[in-house]
Amino acid sequence: MNILITGGAGFIGSHLCDALLKRDHHITVVDNLVLGRKENIAHLLSRNDFIFIEEDLLHEEAMKSIFRQGNFDMVYHLAANSDIQKGGKDPMVDYDLTFHTTFNVLQLMKEFGIKKFFFASTSAIYGETRDVLNEDYGPLKPVSNYGAGKLASEAFISAFSSTYKIQTWITRFPNVVGERFTHGVIYDFIHKLRKNPTELEVLGNGEQCKPYVYVKDLVEGILYVIDHSNDMYNVYMLGSDTRTEVKDIARMVIEEMALDAVIRYTGGDRGWIGDVPEFRYDLAKVNSLGWHAAHDSDDSVRLAIQKALGK
Ligand SMILES: NC(=O)c1ccc[n+]([C@@H]2O[C@H](COP(=O)([O-])OP(=O)(O)OC[C@H]3O[C@@H](n4cnc5c(N)ncnc54)[C@H](O)[C@@H]3O)[C@@H](O)[C@H]2O)c1
């Protein structure tokens, strides 16, 4: 297939490029590098079956020309704002990068008659709840602008899928970890400890408890869901049904870096406004399709730390 991946120079998008190229597809990446990095896809740039276009999805004329020439069979839309704290300070960030990019891509799909669509969604659409999250859980009450941008995106995707007959796969991820990450708790802890190896500041009380999934397991899961579900509109939770506490992540990072650092908690039950202190995934739907992640949450965290440290 001729595939467009938006946000393909980002953390997850670049792994998806690797996986789809292994399946002999032709890939075009559009990414404006606002958060992504060219080095994530540097190893692909010389290939005949890979095109990288540095462009902003909000530039409508440029995007029209890309779609006109691309003749795409399917779009994987991963571009979004991944800096949730930044989106909390300025709501326009998620309005533009998380929501408006999605709307523009949908409009282009409609205009150019593209009939297959994948969307990278998130646990953040659910907001704050102690219930176990599944595909049918509601009401959805996001507490971050990022979660709101994703939920609004899902709403338009549903409407476009139904109105313009676009076959759609949405997978909702928890925290994704592994090579090439540029944000998140493990990334922050390693960077803080490189600056000050004697003390690690942890935002909150360390009891935040969430599922973590290793990026290569996640990408395999995305492709598994697309291969094994064929409704017009397919929604799946994807990730891990086990969880890891932030204080255990702090301990694992210190241990893997062979340091003797003291952990200092800033206090409170969450790291920042918009953070969700805990959530839990019910993966029965994707499990019944036959998919399980190869690594549980603790193993995913440990592996991601080791990969980040070049082990
Ligand atoms: N990493 C996670 O833990 C996680 C969890 C749930 C959902 N997701 C979703 O998965 C997707 C990928 O996330 P990621 O962690 O790889 O983030 P990332 O920031 O590494 O990737 C997003 C990419 O989108 C690009 N982008 C943003 N705005 C753009 C624009 N206007 N035009 C063109 N490109 C633009 C960025 O430059 C970046 O390369 C995102 O949609 C994210 O919301 C990620």
Image (cartoon, rainbow, N blue to C red):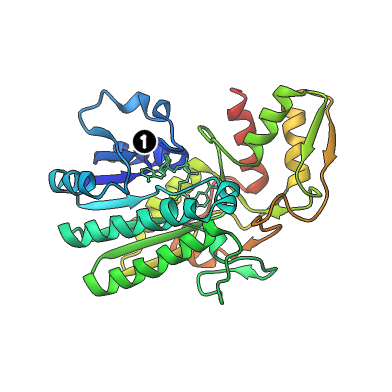
Placement of the C terminus among the 4 image quadrants: top right
Measuring from the top left, give residue 230's x and y in whole percent. 31, 66
> Is 301 placed above or below 243 here?
above
In-image side of 156 versus 263 (left or right):
left
Who is closer to the viewer here, 164 or 55? 55
Pointer 1 local density, CA inside 10 Å: few below 14, some 14–19, many at least 20: some
Task: Please give the residue where the numbered disc 1 appears in the rendered image.
Answer: 18
Who is closer to the viewer here, 234 or 125? 125
Measuring from the top left, give residue 17's x and y in whole percent. 35, 38
In-image side of 126 versus 39 (left or right):
right
In-image side of 149 versus 209 (left or right):
left
The quadrant of the rendered image in which ligand 1 is seen is: top left
Residue at 64 percent across and 68 percent down: it is 132
Residue at 75 percent across and 44 percent down: it is 203
Q: Is residue 257 visible?
A: no
Q: Which residue, as the protein is rendered here, is positioned at the far bottom?
A: 139
Question: Is ligand 1 within 8 Å of the beta carbon of the residue shown at mark 1?
Answer: no
Q: Is residue 244 visible?
A: yes
> Is 191 placed above or below 160 here?
above
Measuring from the top left, give residue 166's x and y in whole percent. 25, 65
> Is 200 placed above or below 203 here?
above
Q: Which quadrant holds residue 160? A: bottom left
Who is closer to the viewer here, 64 or 261? 64
Measuring from the top left, give residue 209's x and y in whole percent. 72, 54
Who is closer to the viewer here, 202 or 238? 202
Q: Amino acid at mark 1?
A: Asp
Q: Which quadrant holds residue 41? A: top left
Local SS, label 1: helix
Q: Which quadrant holds residue 32? A: top left
